[in-house]
Image (cartoon, rainbow, N blue to C red):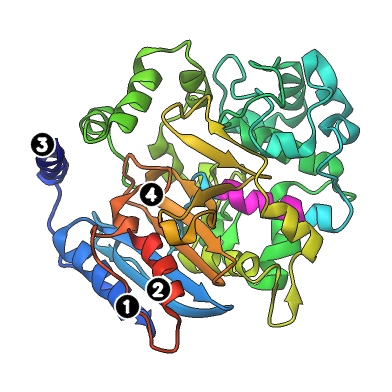
């Protein structure tokens, strides 16, 4: 079976690459203590596995890896640069969750209070008892809006759109299960934030003023149009390419089939909220719309820097992002169980971020925390060893739950760190690229 899967995966890769122009491999950046990481990235580029992306590691609040490779726009031959940004997809959810934690830290929100405390209209149709942390933890049963919608409706008809959100009835009893709110997470969370903020700022403004500007984080919740030239052009797979690619994994194939062939399944309902293809995200008008589920636009450096604060328990070099008690809540899971949307996965969700146990018996019970995104994007941290990682790519794959081999790296390769770093940290970083 392993040989078959390898052969099929190779065939899929060849099929999807046949008609694309071959460009010379490019790898740039620094890797002072993690030389093997740089070598792995270079091998990925030279083999064609990685065609455009960036990978950054922070350790104890300092950058130790800052690498970028390939092309931001292969058709134009535009290279990926140190400040190239890309759509972070669901990695945006973790960024939004940290923004909400900042609001809790300031006393503007309380995780335990009902959403309806801040947004009275939300209480309609069985939603009155859904708490802020249940909404963040995908427990609300609000994965669908019924009919498809558009991002322009959300942006241009805010009051009408809010009324539409209020009328939705949960698909399951809130608080009893979790199911991944792939798109609706952003609609509900952004509305809650606007209602709860004393100045009624939207998520775009709030993140910029409370986190991005004061902490120097290169992330935008919706990219201003004058910065569009920094953005990589998304390269997306067709439905046929997705089908071929999903055949390399039973989990991927199961998800694809439910999405494509079972429209009444919870999975399909959660993934068909928008009347838009991924390629629409190459439109600067769309990319400028902040939506906390998937339209954060970031550099890998920005994602890793933000998570470095989480890796350091909320404070780096004397600058505090979160108080210890709020940081503790953020790093505590709420539920661990099979997900109702991503049915092939046993997922552990907290207050807007996910938990992934390290796959080593020696470190049983120790988690990597953060959020992955469609296409292979990753933002995550390990507070035990004070490590944070950001990876973004514009050459999007079918992967989305910490499973993209470009990020994980060739199986069996080890990461050898500087002798100044302990062996235990070597194992943790190894898990990032496996």
Residue 416 image label: 1
Please tell me which residue is depicted at 52% across the width and 54% down the height of the picture.
297
How far is mark 1 from mark 3, CA to CA? Answer: 32 Å
In this picture, is 166 found above or below 349? above
Please tell me which residue is depicted at 53% across the width and 24% down the height of the picture.
340
- Residue matched to label 4: 376
Residue 413 placement: quadrant: bottom left
How far is mark 3 from mark 4, CA to CA? Answer: 23 Å
- Residue matched to label 2: 426
How far is mark 1 from mark 4, CA to CA? Answer: 24 Å
Residue furthest bottom as drawn: 420
Residue placed most toward the observer, 244 or 328: 328
Nearer the observer: mark 2 or 3; the answer is 2
Residue 163 placement: quadrant: top right
Question: Circles 2 and 1: CB distance less than 8 Å?
Answer: yes
Kind of element beneath mark 1? loop
Nearer the observer: mark 1 or 4; the answer is 1
Q: On the picture, is 152 further left or further right than 48?
A: right
Q: Position of residue 189 (x, y in %)?
A: 71, 38
Kind of element beneath mark 4? helix
Residue 226 placement: quadrant: bottom right
Kind of element beneath mark 3? helix
Specify start and end residues of the magenta stretch as a single range.
Answer: 92-101
Say whether residue 388 is visible: yes
- Residue matched to label 3: 4
* The C terminus - image quarter: bottom left
Sequence-first disc among 2 and 4:
4
Q: Position of residue 223 (x, y in %)?
A: 56, 54
Task: Give neighbour class at mark 4: few <14, some 14-19, many 20+ (Cα, 10 Å).
Answer: many
The answer to if 250 sits in the magenta stretch is: no
Residue placed most toward the observer, 176 or 171: 176
């Amino acid at each position: 079976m392993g040989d078959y899967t390898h052969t099929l995966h190779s065939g899929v890769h060849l099929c999807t690459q046949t008609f694309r122009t071959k460009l010379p491999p490019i790898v740039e950046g620094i890797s002072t203590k993690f030389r093997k990481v740089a070598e792995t990235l270079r091998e990925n580029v030279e083999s064609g596995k990685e065609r455009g992306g960036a990978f950054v590691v922070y350790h104890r609040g300092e950058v130790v890896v800052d690498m970028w490779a390939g092309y931001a726009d292969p058709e134009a031959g535009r290279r990926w640069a140190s400040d190239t940004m890309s759509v972070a997809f669901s990695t945006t959810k973790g960024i939004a969750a940290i923004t909400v934690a900042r609001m809790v830290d300031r006393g503007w929100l309380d995780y335990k209070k009902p959403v309806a405390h801040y947004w009275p209209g939300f209480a309609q149709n069985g939603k009155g008892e859904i708490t802020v942390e249940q909404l963040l933890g995908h427990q609300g049963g609000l994965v669908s809006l019924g009919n498809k919608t558009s991002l322009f409706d959300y942006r241009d008809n805010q009051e009408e759109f809010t009324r539409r959100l209020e009328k939705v009835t949960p698909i399951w009893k809130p608080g009893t299960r979790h199911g991944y709110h792939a798109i609706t997470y952003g609609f509900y969370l952004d509305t809650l934030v606007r209602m709860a903020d004393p100045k009624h700022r939207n998520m775009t403004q709030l993140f910029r003023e409370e986190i991005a500007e004061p902490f120097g984080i290169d992330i935008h919740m919706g990219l201003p149009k004058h910065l569009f030239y920094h953005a990589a052009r998304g390269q997306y797979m067709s439905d046929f390419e997705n089908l071929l690619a999903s055949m390399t994994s039973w989990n991927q194939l199961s998800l694809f089939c439910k999405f494509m062939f079972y429209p009444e399944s919870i999975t399909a309902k959660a993934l068909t909220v928008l009347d838009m293809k991924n390629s629409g995200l190459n439109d600067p008008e769309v990319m400028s719309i902040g939506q906390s589920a998937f339209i954060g636009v970031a550099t890998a450096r920005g994602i890793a820097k933000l998570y470095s604060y989480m890796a350091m328990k909320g404070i780096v070099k004397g600058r505090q992002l979160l108080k210890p008690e709020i940081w503790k809540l953020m790093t505590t899971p709420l539920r661990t169980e099979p997900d109702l949307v991503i049915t092939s996965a046993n997922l552990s969700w907290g207050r807007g971020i996910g938990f992934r146990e390290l796959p080593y018996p020696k470190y049983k019970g120790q988690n990597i925390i953060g959020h992955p995104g469609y296409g292979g994007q990753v933002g995550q941290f390990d507070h035990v060893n004070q490590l944070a990682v950001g990876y973004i790519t514009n050459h999007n794959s079918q992967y989305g739950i910490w499973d993209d081999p470009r990020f994980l790296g060739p199986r069996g390769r080890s990461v050898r760190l500087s002798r100044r770093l302990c062996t235990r940290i070597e194992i943790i970083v190894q898990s990032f690229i496996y």
